[in-house]
Image (cartoon, rainbow, N blue to C red):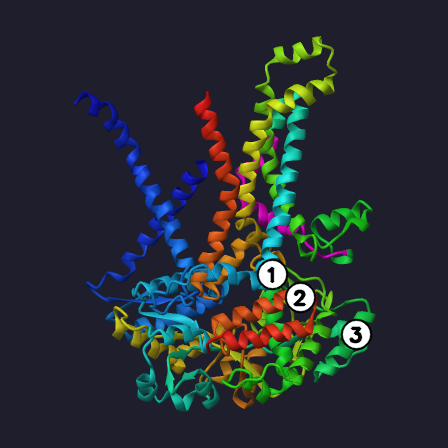
């Protein structure tokens, strides 16, 4: 009886969330994978769909649009994750050097986090207007006023580097958050360690290179995971900036048109599965590493 | 973990929204509710719906109109919600849809009732143009009542920009159009303004019609259509040439139309909803004067053909209040209903016996053309191609916009026609 009393209240407390997550996350994930392996290519007709194995998963690679959207997602991810990490680290580094009104700056850099991707997208759509020359508005206009006309370009409508432009609003939004993570990391390095290094004749740069950076590794990894999964799932920002256009197509927007415009649930589920798998590639190793570390300590 | 928690919260809010729908189909104490599902929420269209609703209330005191409109231009969001309702077999009493192939998915899966009985009862086959009836019939059955007609093949232009470039009058053929575009380019203005990707599909349908001619265009949507022939190649080459004169793409059709109104660009090809935007007072439009600040003509090579699209209402099988829905369809089909709705929406009635004095300026030209022209159906606006086909064409246009490869474009269109299941 006393033993029951010990674990039952705890179980009761967490069971609603366990049930909800089991049904709405893992249950629906499973349902999605099942749908992706059927030939239900018509949304309204009441056909259950026959099991076709991995046919949809292989077939989609012959579609030009899929190749394009995967390429776009990779360019976006590399630029966004790289950009936000470097910029966030730099901001944290400058903060850590002890500038005046630090808390003020911290708030300023963190504020973009409070804005939704949709709002960010609407503003940046205007800033990144692709008109040049006489008709330029937004940033292109600013370049014009500053006499930097050669910097004017098509932004997200550029066929080759459009997705890199699409990453700029995302970097703007997330780098403050990454700064906060790194700043906490910097602060977590005990002053004694740095002192010890300096006493041993280490230069200031050497202190960072050999003492601080290695200790930031867990923080960097967390930041990488957080940015990576946001990036692979990106949908709202792209839709707010350019809508459902091929020129900025990513897997998530392709999934949307497959389901709601082409009325092809199986194809939509296939794309959704690929998105989940790509995020899992990021997240699962991290979870394993995290669990092992937890056991050790 | 945070992400998991967030997505669970998201799902909870979603399901909460879903739960809210249930109350719509209830009711039924005093006056029985008729749930009318549409996406008419914008200025003009919502006013038109209200006017029809007034007539409905007067004629049917025993029914209560329930407005189940979902906001969002061209009905993207509305249709996503609608298909989930139909899948769950909980249809609204009647819903809006583009007349023509867009409804095919619903018809094939048996979600709609044939309206032939209503057409016979009201003798609608005599008041709608025969070609319209032919183009919306599926195996002799009609499944919707068209309320209004919009025209897709309109060339909008700025007379003073044309004058400066040394062009007198709108181009009559596609070849003339290309020559004129070149003249404008030399005068330093944007020859043709374009918007986001869908406006290019809109442009494509006008270029196809103008290059192929009406009969060949209409044949593209029949069972044995040949998309691979040399005439189509020529039309796509024209499309490529015309696109090479386009300005940088704007966010949507309005900013593209505005470039013409502002004198930055010479031409724009857009449906006739652009007229309201050009002409209406500054709250909803640009307040421009027709024939002076802007002007229009049939898009090049399409004079004498009316490329139409139409909003229509349907009767879903298992409608909770079938009698109420039929009462609504009768209002929507009537002269009185259509003449109340269309002047406000900025479109013309599908009926041939409309009161001409209600339609002024552009609309009077439109009405005149409607009664005399041959008809062709729009691609982008759901008349000739079902959703799958249209989406495949849209994808092909989006990819073409990047690589400008005509041969590949044509292959994609051939495949789209083959795989459409239409």
Q: CA distance from mark 2 to mark 3?
A: 20 Å
**Residue B403 placement: quadrant:** bottom right
* Residue A246 tag number: 1
Left or right of residue B213, residue B88 in this image: left
Q: Secondary structure at mark 2?
A: helix
Foreground label between 2 and 3? 2
Per the rendered image, the range of residues in magenta is A107-132
Instruction: Read off the chain for label 1.
Output: A
Residue B196: image x %, image y %?
62, 63
The answer, for residue B270, to whether it is visible in the render is no
Q: Are the residues under marks 1 and 2 on the same chain?
A: no
Q: Which of B163 and A29 lies nearest the eye of the viewer?
A: A29
Left or right of residue B227, residue B35 in this image: left
Q: Residue at x 25, y 68 (%)?
A: B320
Q: Which residue is mark 2?
A: B401
The total number of labels drawn is: 3
Q: Residue furthest left?
A: A1
Q: Is residue B88 above or below residue B331?
A: above
Q: Secondary structure at mark 1?
A: helix
Tag 2: Cα neighbours inside 10 Å, few (<14), some, or many (≥20)? some
Q: Which of A34 and B79 lies nearest the eye of the viewer?
A: A34
Marks 1 and 2 close (CB-CB < 8 Å) = yes
* Residue B182 tag number: 3
């Amino acid at each position: 009886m006393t033993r029951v009393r010990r674990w039952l209240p705890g179980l009761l407390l967490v069971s609603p969330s366990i049930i909800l997550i089991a049904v709405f996350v893992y249950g629906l994930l499973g349902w999605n994978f099942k749908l992706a392996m059927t030939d239900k290519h018509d949304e309204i007709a009441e056909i259950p769909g026959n099991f076709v194995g991995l046919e949809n998963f292989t077939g989609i690679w012959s579609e030009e649009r899929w190749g394009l959207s995967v390429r776009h997602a990779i360019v976006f991810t590399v630029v966004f994750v790289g950009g936000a990490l470097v910029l966030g680290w730099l901001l944290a580094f400058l903060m850590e050097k002890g500038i005046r009104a630090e808390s003020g700056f911290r708030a300023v850099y963190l504020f973009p986090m409070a804005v939704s991707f949709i709002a960010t997208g609407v503003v940046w759509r205007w800033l990144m207007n692709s008109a040049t020359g006489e008709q330029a508005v937004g940033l292109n206009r600013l370049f014009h006023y500053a006499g930097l006309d050669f910097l004017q370009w098509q932004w997200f409508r550029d066929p080759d580097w459009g997705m890199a432009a699409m990453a700029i609003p995302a970097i703007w939004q997330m780098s403050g958050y990454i700064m906060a993570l790194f700043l906490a990391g910097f602060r977590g390095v005990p002053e004694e360690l740095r002192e010890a290094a300096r006493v041993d004749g280490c230069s200031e740069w050497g202190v960072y290179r050999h003492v601080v950076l290695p200790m930031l590794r867990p923080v960097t990894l967390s930041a990488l995971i957080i940015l990576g999964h946001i990036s692979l799932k990106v949908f709202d920002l792209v839709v707010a900036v350019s809508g459902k256009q091929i020129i900025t197509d990513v897997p998530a927007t392709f999934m949307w048109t497959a389901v709601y415009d082409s009325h092809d649930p199986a194809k939509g589920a296939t794309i959704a599965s690929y998105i989940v798998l790509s995020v899992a590639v990021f997240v699962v190793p991290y979870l394993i590493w995290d669990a092992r570390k937890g056991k050790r300590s | 973990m945070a992400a998991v928690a967030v997505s669970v919260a998201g799902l909870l809010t979603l399901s909460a929204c879903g739960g809210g729908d249930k109350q719509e189909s209830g009711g039924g104490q005093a006056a029985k509710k008729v749930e009318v599902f549409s996406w008419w929420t914008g200025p003009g269209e919502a006013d038109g719906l209200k006017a029809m609703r007034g007539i409905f209330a007067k004629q049917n005191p025993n029914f209560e109109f329930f407005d189940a409109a979902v906001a969002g231009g061209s009905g993207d969001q509305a249709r996503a919600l609608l298909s989930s309702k139909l899948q769950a077999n909980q249809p609204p009493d009647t819903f809006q849809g583009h007349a023509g192939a867009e409804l095919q998915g619903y018809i094939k899966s048996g979600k709609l009732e044939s309206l032939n009985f209503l057409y016979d009862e009201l003798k609608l086959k005599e008041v709608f143009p025969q070609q319209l009836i032919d183009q919306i019939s599926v195996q002799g059955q009609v499944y919707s009542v068209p309320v209004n007609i919009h025209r897709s093949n309109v060339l909008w232009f700025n007379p003073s920009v044309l004058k400066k470039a040394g062009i007198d009058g709108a181009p009559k053929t596609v070849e003339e159009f290309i020559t004129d575009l070149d003249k404008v380019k030399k005068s330093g203005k944007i020859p043709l303004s374009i918007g986001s990707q869908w406006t290019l599909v809109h442009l494509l349908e006008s270029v196809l019609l103008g290059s192929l001619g009406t009969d060949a265009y209409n044949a593209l949507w029949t069972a044995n259509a040949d998309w691979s022939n040399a005439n189509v190649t020529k039309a796509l080459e024209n499309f490529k040439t015309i696109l090479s004169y386009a300005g940088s793409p704007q966010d949507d059709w309005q900013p593209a139309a505005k470039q013409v109104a502002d004198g930055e660009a010479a031409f724009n090809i857009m449906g006739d909803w652009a007229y309201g935007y050009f002409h209406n007072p500054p709250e909803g439009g640009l307040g421009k004067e027709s024939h002076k600040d802007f002007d229009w003509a049939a898009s090049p090579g399409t004079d004498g053909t009316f490329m139409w699209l139409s909003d229509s209402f349907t009767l879903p099988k298992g409608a909770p209040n079938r009698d109420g829905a039929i009462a609504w369809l009768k209002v929507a089909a009537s002269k009185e209903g259509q003449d109340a709705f269309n002047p406000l929406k900025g479109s013309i009635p599908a009926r041939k016996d409309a009161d001409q004095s209600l339609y002024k300026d552009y609309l009077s030209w439109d009405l005149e053309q409607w009664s005399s022209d041959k008809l062709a159906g729009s691609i982008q606006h759901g008349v000739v191609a079902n959703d799958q086909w249209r989406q495949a064409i849209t994808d092909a246009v989006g990819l073409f916009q990047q690589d400008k490869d005509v041969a590949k474009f044509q292959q994609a269109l051939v495949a789209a026609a083959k795989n459409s299941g239409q």
